[in-house]
Image (cartoon, helix red, strand yellow):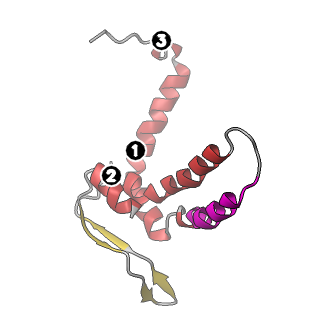
Amino acid sequence: QSHFLAGLVTFARPVSLSVIPRREGNGYRLGEVKLANASWYNSALTALAPLLLVLIPWWIAVLRTRGAWHFAPLDAGLAFLIAPQFLACWPSAADWKLAMRSWPLALIAGAGWYAWMQYPWLRSWHWPAA
C-alpha cells in the first residue's frame, strides 16, 4: 500500500499492514496501516500518499502517446488495467482527517511561496560551489 511506503520514507514508522477488506457498519474498510510515529511533519505526506497513484495512468498515457497516435488492442487492455487507479488514488475520509495534523506544514509552505514570490532576489541566489 502507498501509505505503508510513504510511512517508511517519512519516518512515520509503520508497524502493521492489512489489505484484507473488513465490514464496518454500512461499508467496508479496504485496508489499514498503523503508524507508530505519525506527527505534524509526516502525517499529510503519509495520509495523502494515494494521490501519487494517479501518476501511474499519466505515465502510461505519456508512453502510449509518443510517436504516432493510433489505437491498438494493447490500449484497451491498458485502459482496463489502469482505470481503477483513478478510483484508488482518492484518500479516504480518515486519511484527510490524519492529514489535517500537518497544518503547520501548509503554513510553512505558504510562507515560503509568499517569500519566493515577493522577494525576487531569492530566485537569483547563488549557492557556493562545493
Q: Is residue 74 magenta?
A: yes
Q: Are marks 1 and 2 in contact (CB under 8 Å)?
A: yes
Q: Secondary structure at mark 3?
A: loop
Closer to the chain start, of discs 3 and 1, is 1
Residue bearing the label numbered 1:
105
Residue bearing the label numbered 3:
124
Residue 45 in percent (x, y) is at: 39, 51
- CA–CA distance in space, label 3 to label 1: 25 Å
Q: Secondary structure at mark 1?
A: helix
Mark 3, other Cα within 10 Å: few <14 / some 14–19 / many ≥20: few
Between tags 2 and 3, which lies in front?
3
- Residue 48 appears in the rendering: no
Residue bearing the label numbered 2:
40
Magenta segment: 71-86
Residue drawn at the location 37% of the way across and 61% of the way down: 3
- CA–CA distance in space, label 1 to label 2: 7 Å
- Residue 8 appears in the rendering: yes
Between tags 3 and 1, which lies in front?
3
Closer to the chain start, of discs 2 and 3, is 2
From what the image shows, is residue 119 above or below residue 30? Answer: above
Residue drawn at the location 64% of the way across and 64% of the way down: 77
